Structure formats: structure tokens, C-alpha cells
Image (cartoon, helix red, strand yellow):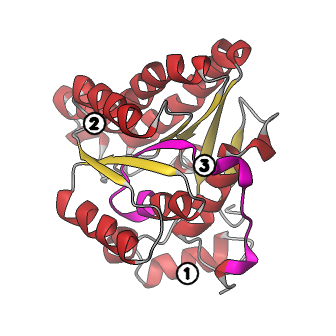
Amino acid sequence: MLPQSSFATYPSLKNRSVFITGGGSGIGASLVQHFCDQECRVAFVDIAQEASKALVEEIAGSGRNIPLFLPCDLRDTEALRRAIHQAADEHGPVTVLLNNAGNDDRHQTEDVTPVYWDDRMAVNLKHQFFAAQTVRPMMRDSGGGSIINFSSITVMVGDADCPAYVTAKAGIWGMTRALAREFGPERIRVNALVPGWVMTQRQKQLWLDDAGERQIRERQCLREKVQPQDIARMALFLAADDSRMCTSQQFIVDAGWI
């Protein structure tokens, strides 16, 4: 494992107002930590209050910029809008949005009801659109910004054990392309970050068994497991001015999954 000092610092991110969905654990928690490391003014929402408060305490104890945690169920669009506006009131207009939140619970087609389908769309897709809609005026009036939507390589692989999730994550790519075209004249960049199999605590507890270890060895070009910080570092690049001419693209971080 390389030391933290081996990785980039982005001067253009200092003091940026950053809003992260699903920031309490997993990839989201790593996003919160990494953007705080860059001296950003970070706000994040999550439904898991205990884990989120523990993350804030951990970061506060390390001397880094302390993030603002706002409890929110992203299925409630008005609550999400209020959280974004509260973050802007405290940190200034949001100019970096990371639409990270999602849930990849396994399911089979025959078990999906209309209610469950709508919930999967709300949890994995709908909030990304309305968060982007909400921050757009702030970014436009600030001279531009970066929106990073989170998709998944399950779309490319076509996993058979979560069809509603795969559908939602595929929709994110279409949404990214459309918003990038519409928002581009306002200097707002919109990209999709596409993680592979990331070793969050949830993934390791639920699915990393002997068969999973074998699958990683057989399907990844690189043998090291993808970690949350690998995703966060790509997100930093996409948020920073270093990527100022990158928009309407998918950026895959999957160790070469085939």
C-alpha cells in the first residue's frame, strides 16, 4: 500500500463547496475523507446516522476540515433539495456534486413487484437527477462546476442477480450524456464514474467468499483488490480543474475486469 503522500493534491479544490450523497460508509465515506483532505467544505447526506456521526468525529479528531452531516432519506426528493440548500447556506454554492448513493441488494426477476421496482429506481437513479437539477443554478451562477454520477460495471457485465439495480445504473449513463450536453454551455461538467468490485465492508461481509476471491483472480487484469480510496482518487481528479475538458464520459476504475 502506497503512503498517502504519494498521491496528488489539487489546489483548485481548496475551499470548494462539495456535496456527497451516501457519504456515511463504504465508497461514500472515502469520498468524504478525501475531499476533506483537499481542504474542501464538505457536506454529505446519508440515512445511516450512527455511522455518519462516527465518521464526522473521526475526521474532526484528525485535524482535517470537519464535514457537515445532514440526515436524509434520498427517496424524499424535497428532503434532498433542502439538504443541498442547507449545505449551500453553510458552505457556499455547491460546485462539486458526487451522486454516490445506491444499493445493490440482490433480487430475481420473478420476485420484483412494482413497488420494489419503483424503490430501486428511487434509491439508485432518481435522486441523482434531482440533485443535479438542484445544484445547476448554483454552479451556473458560480461560473461552472463538476457533477459526478456513480454507475457500475454491473451494466457492462450484465449481472443476473440484480436486474432492477443494473437497469438503474444503465440509466445513469444516459442521464449523464444528456445533462452534459444541456449543462455544457454553463461550464458545468457531467461525468459518470464506474467502479468495479470495490472492497467495502459491506461487500466483504456479504459476498467475498472463496468463489469471489477466485473470480477476482480470474477476471481482473490487476490482482490487487479495488479499494474505496481508488474510487475517491478518481473522483478528486474529475472534480478538480485538472479535468476541465472532461465531460460526458465514463471513467472506469475496475482493475481491468473482463
Structural distance between the alpha carbons of marks 3 and 2: 20 Å
Q: Quadrant of residue 113?
A: top left
| Residue marked by disc 1 | 214
Q: Is residue 35 above or below residue 183?
A: below
Q: Nearer the viewer, mark 3 or mark 2?
A: 2
| Numbered label attached to residue 9 | none
x and y, in percent, of residue 195 in the image? 58, 55
| Numbered label attached to residue 74 | 2
Pick the quarter of the image with the C terminus.
Answer: bottom right
Report the residue at 46% width, 61% height from top.
65
Q: Is residue 19 magenta?
A: yes
| Residue marked by disc 3 | 194
Structural distance between the alpha carbons of marks 1 and 2: 35 Å
Report the residue at 54% width, 48% height from top.
152
> Closer to the N terminus: mark 1 or mark 2?
2
Q: Is residue 235 left or right of residue 63?
A: right
> Closer to the N terminus: mark 3 or mark 2?
2
x and y, in percent, of residue 108 in the image? 29, 46
Q: Please, what is the three-letter code of the amino acid marked with disc 3?
A: Val
Q: Please, what is the three-letter code of the amino acid marked with disc 2?
A: Leu
Q: Please, what is the three-letter code of the amino acid marked with disc 1?
A: Arg
Pick the quarter of the image with the N terminus.
Answer: bottom right
Q: Is residue 73 magenta?
A: no
* Residue segment shown in magenta: 5-29
Say which of 186 and 253 sits in front.
Answer: 186
Q: Could you tell me which secondary element the residue under label 1 belongs to?
A: helix
Structural distance between the alpha carbons of marks 1 and 3: 22 Å
Q: Is residue 47 left or right of residue 130?
A: left
